[in-house]
């Protein structure tokens, strides 16, 4: 039987590395916090589900796939990114950097989907762990026990925060938008540029234009975080920063009142449908107020009971705006209201 000792955590010269992903899945039973551990046939110890990334796969997507394959758990609710652990792989041929995510689940019984190995899921008390094969996995659980319990009690939103996009946070936006610049090389410049200029700059040109705004000290929008993981974005500023609005028949200004506009959202697909847009809107109200705005205006989609494909909901949904205190002030199209929120509070420079 293989014994894991300290040599597995010392990287030999010349050994290549590989990125992996795994998950800590928790649920409550009779008031006790349980963690999902798996056993593979032939091994008496327990492990956390984890594995390598498939080509083109995002890290968190890989974690969900590995959990489904080894533990049979689906429909997971992401609570936080828990940590990263490094070591040699089982054959000692690669240095593996594994990203672990924390999830909650209500599934007591499961059926792992891996067809090459036989896995069995066990729900074990977090405060009374069994023998585990990989020492770093046990260390991860023990060192994170308090934060796991807190997140389980408070829910995922406890770790959420919203920050302005600054020079230092530019890499986070790049990570969120990915190689396609959120959608088709847009880089959230659609509302800021004339159409011909926008089309010429699709991709690198639009990215450079947005980055130039940030490097010049501007704050073109806000980033939402779950712990240290960026999960969402909204673009906002004075209405005249978005000249395309004035050229759009259904969204052109309804009066001469100076307003700020929140024009676009982008949410990581792992967080969609969980209230990130609402969190961004609440933060947008505070940010606009601090910059001296009296009114924040938005241009959401109102599709009624119909489902809206995320790619066509980049201006947000009317239901999220209404929840954040916006009211409809005009509607020139059946599905495109103009909504406003009157801002009040300490005002510019407060806090």
Image (cartoon, helix red, strand yellow):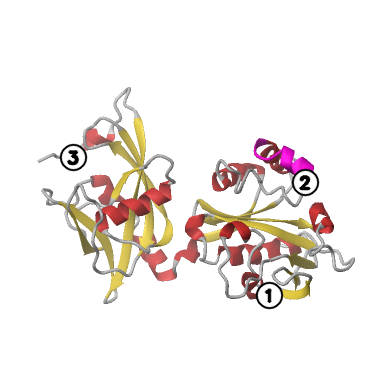
User: In this orientation, does residue 128 appear?
Assistant: no
Few, some or many residues within 10 Å of mark 3 (<14, 14–19, 20+): few
- Real-space Cα separation, disc 2 to disc 3, in angstroms: 60 Å
Contact (Cβ within 8 Å) of mark 1 with mark 2: no
Name the residue tied to disc 3.
Answer: 4
Position of residue 43 relative to residue 102, above or below, is above
Contact (Cβ within 8 Å) of mark 3 with mark 1: no
Quarter of the image where the N terminus is located: top left
Give the mark nearer the N terminus: 1 vs 2.
Answer: 2
- Real-space Cα separation, disc 1 to disc 2, in angstroms: 32 Å
- Please state the extent of the stretch shown in magenta in the rendering: 196-204
Helix, strand or loop status at disc 2:
helix
**Residue in the image at 19% along x and 48% along y:** 117
Q: How many marks?
A: 3
Is 90 in the magenta?
A: no
- Tell whether 147 sits left or right of 39: right
Is 203 in the magenta?
A: yes
Helix, strand or loop status at disc 3:
loop
Q: Quadrant of residue 163?
A: bottom right
Q: Quadrant of residue 289?
A: bottom right
Name the residue tied to disc 1.
Answer: 325
- Tell whether 217 sits left or right of 164: right
Residue 120 in the image, given as x and y percentages of width and height: 18, 58
Give the mark nearer the N terminus: 3 vs 1.
Answer: 3
- Real-space Cα separation, disc 3 to disc 1, in angstroms: 56 Å
């Amino acid at each position: 039987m293989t014994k894991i000792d300290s040599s597995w955590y010392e990287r030999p010269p010349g050994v290549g590395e590989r990125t992996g992903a795994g998950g800590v899945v928790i649920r409550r039973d009779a008031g006790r916090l349980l963690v999902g551990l798996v056993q593979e046939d032939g091994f008496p110890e327990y492990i956390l589900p984890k594995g390598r990334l498939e080509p083109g796969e995002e890290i968190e997507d890989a974690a969900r796939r590995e959990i489904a394959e080894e533990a049979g758990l689906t429909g997971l609710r992401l609570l936080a990114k828990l940590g990263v652990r490094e070591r040699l792989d089982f054959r000692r041929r690669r240095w593996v950097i594994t990203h672990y995510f924390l999830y909650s689940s209500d599934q007591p019984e499961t059926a792992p989907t891996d067809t090459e190995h036989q896995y069995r899921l066990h729900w074990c008390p977090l405060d009374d762990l069994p023998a585990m094969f990989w020492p770093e996995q046990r260390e991860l659980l023990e060192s994170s026990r308090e934060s796991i319990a807190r997140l389980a009690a408070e829910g995922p939103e406890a770790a959420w925060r919203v920050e302005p996009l600054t020079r230092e946070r530019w890499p986070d936006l790049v990570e969120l938008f990915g190689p396609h610049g959120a959608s088709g090389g847009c880089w959230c410049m659609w509302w800021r540029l004339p159409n011909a200029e926008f089309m010429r700059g699709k991709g690198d040109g639009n990215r450079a234009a947005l980055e130039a705004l940030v490097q010049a000290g501007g704050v073109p929008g806000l980033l939402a975080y779950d712990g240290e993981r960026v999960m969402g974005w909204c673009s906002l500023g004075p209405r005249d920063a978005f000249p395309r609005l004035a050229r759009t028949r259904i969204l052109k200004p309804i009066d001469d009142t100076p307003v700020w506009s929140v024009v676009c959202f982008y949410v990581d697909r792992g967080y969609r449908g969980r209230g990130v847009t609402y969190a961004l809107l609440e933060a947008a109200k505070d940010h606009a107020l601090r910059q001296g705005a009296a009114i924040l205006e938005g241009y959401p989609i109102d599709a009624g009971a119909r489902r809206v494909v995320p790619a066509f909901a980049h201006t947000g949904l009317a239901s999220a705006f209404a929840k954040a205190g916006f009211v409809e002030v005009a509607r020139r199209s059946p599905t495109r209201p103009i909504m406003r929120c009157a801002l009040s509070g300490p005002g510019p420079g407060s806090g």
